[in-house]
Amino acid sequence: MVNEEDPGFISRDDILEKFGAFIDRKCSRKMLRFLLQKSSPEVHEDVVADYIDFRKTVRHGFPSRVSCFAYDSVLNILAIGNHSGDVNIYGGNGFIWSAEIPGKKGSGKSAAHMYFACGLGILIVLCQDSTFVRFSIEGAEIAARSVLHETRLKKITSCCMLQRINVKEAVLLIGTVSGNVFALDINSLELSEYIVFEDSLLQRIPDDVKQDKYPVDLLSTCPTNPRLTVMVFNHRLIVSYDSSTNELLGTSLFDVHCKNITWTRDGCRIILALHDGSYASCDPTNLMCCERPAQVFGPFPCIPTKKAYYAETSRPRLYFDAERRDATYSGRIDWATRSIDLATLHAVASLGVGSINGASATLLSATSTTLLSGLLRTA
């Protein structure tokens, strides 16, 4: 017979209480383990990896997050770069060369600007961290080569590809914040001085147009005369320079900032896109203003005008790349994504657009998600 007064006696209620506490503790541990599995990303990735094998196999469609593009008018190929460091070159019959900017991570990998050495299949890419990468087409592959950083390039403010009569002698002109212009050889990737501002230009600038500082904000060379270079210092001072004679041909001081320089096909005029929504046409030899309308269209101008192009068909027309109209009414022009760049092409056979009796041109406009192409011709 069981004696309930015995010190070693355990009652039924005590057994149930201890067993219940044990069960609760076990359940709590299991629940805690379950919750940790759900909240831990490492465990979750291991579970997913057991069932899914993810690999990048092919790129399809238009590149995302487009940042810049360039066009080779001799080989008729188009290069597009994006913020992820991808570089795609499109040729005829749907052929695509794909590459990636090597040795970079993060925002420095983004392609900021592209420059083709026309006729050579060589593409120079300026990255977001102010370094250069050279891509060259070698058959079905693309070879990439990084340019060593130069201490002389303190801050790059502008670039332009200088095409010479011998296409193999093309160099990339690099404008800096100090006013000096350097030349990057596209073959050896060696850097040399092209224009030393203090020696070549400072003493020749008239006193009435001198500025406090002279960063090279814009840089452009004549398509028919590679010796002629037009530069914009401190956004407003335009200088025309002959590199063969080291001579300053002309200067002009604008009252508004200049946003871009483009040339007519014959090299007889330059078109300056201005910040106030207008444009100016000048003679590149002396920078005399040939045309500057007070108001391009209205009553609400596009501000600013980022680029202005002459599309020379049978009747020349001027096209603008600008921000939306500054209007308070509903009749404003707007796009879902902002324009990255604008260019006019001529006789683009490999891209599916050809010249019709010499009276047509192609207008290319790139956004972050789309490449727009339009055939411009006069009936």
Image (cartoon, grey):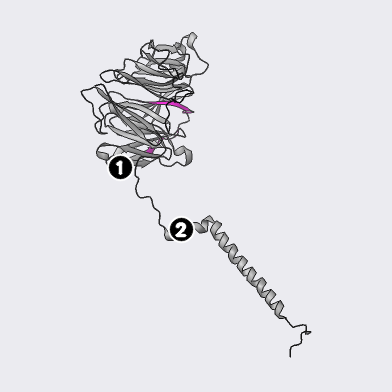
Question: Which quadrant of the rendered structure holds the C terminus?
Answer: top left
Which residue is rendered at x = 43% and y = 29% of the image? 334
Can you give x and y, in whole percent of width and height, for residue 228 in the image?
Answer: 35, 17
Residue 28 within the magenta-colored segment of the rendering: no
The 10 Å Cα crowd at callout 2, few under 14, some 14 to 19, many 20 or more, is few
Q: In front: 263, or 244?
A: 263
Q: Residue furthest left?
A: 357
Residue 48: image tag: 2
Q: Position of residue 260 (x, y in %)?
A: 41, 22
Residue type for callout 1:
Glu
Query: In this rendering, does residue 319 appear at all?
Result: yes
- Residue 373, quarter of the rendered image: top left
Mark 2 lies on a secondary structure that is: helix
Q: State if disc 2 and disc 1 touch (CB < 8 Å).
A: no
Q: Tell me the residue that label 1 is attached to.
A: 141
Q: Which is more toward the observer, 261 or 337?
A: 337
Give coordinates of residue 122: x percent, y percent: 32, 33
Query: Of all residues shown, which one is farthest toward the right?
Result: 5
Task: Give the magenta part as a residue range.
Answer: 145-161
Question: Of 114 and 134, which appears nearest the observer?
Answer: 114
Quadrant in the picture for the N terminus: bottom right
Q: Which mark is residue 90?
A: none
Circle 1 packing at 10 Å, graded few (<14), some (14-19), many (20+), is few
- Residue at 65%, 72% (x, y): give it: 22
The answer to whether residue 159 is magenta is yes
Q: Horizontal placement of 127 versus 228: left or right?
A: right
Residue at position x 44%, y 17% from top?
Answer: 299
Query: In the drawing, does residue 36 fall left or right of residue 252?
Result: right
The vertical placement of 49 against 308, above or below, is below
- Total numbered labels placed on residues in the image: 2
Q: CA distance from mark 1 to mark 2?
A: 35 Å
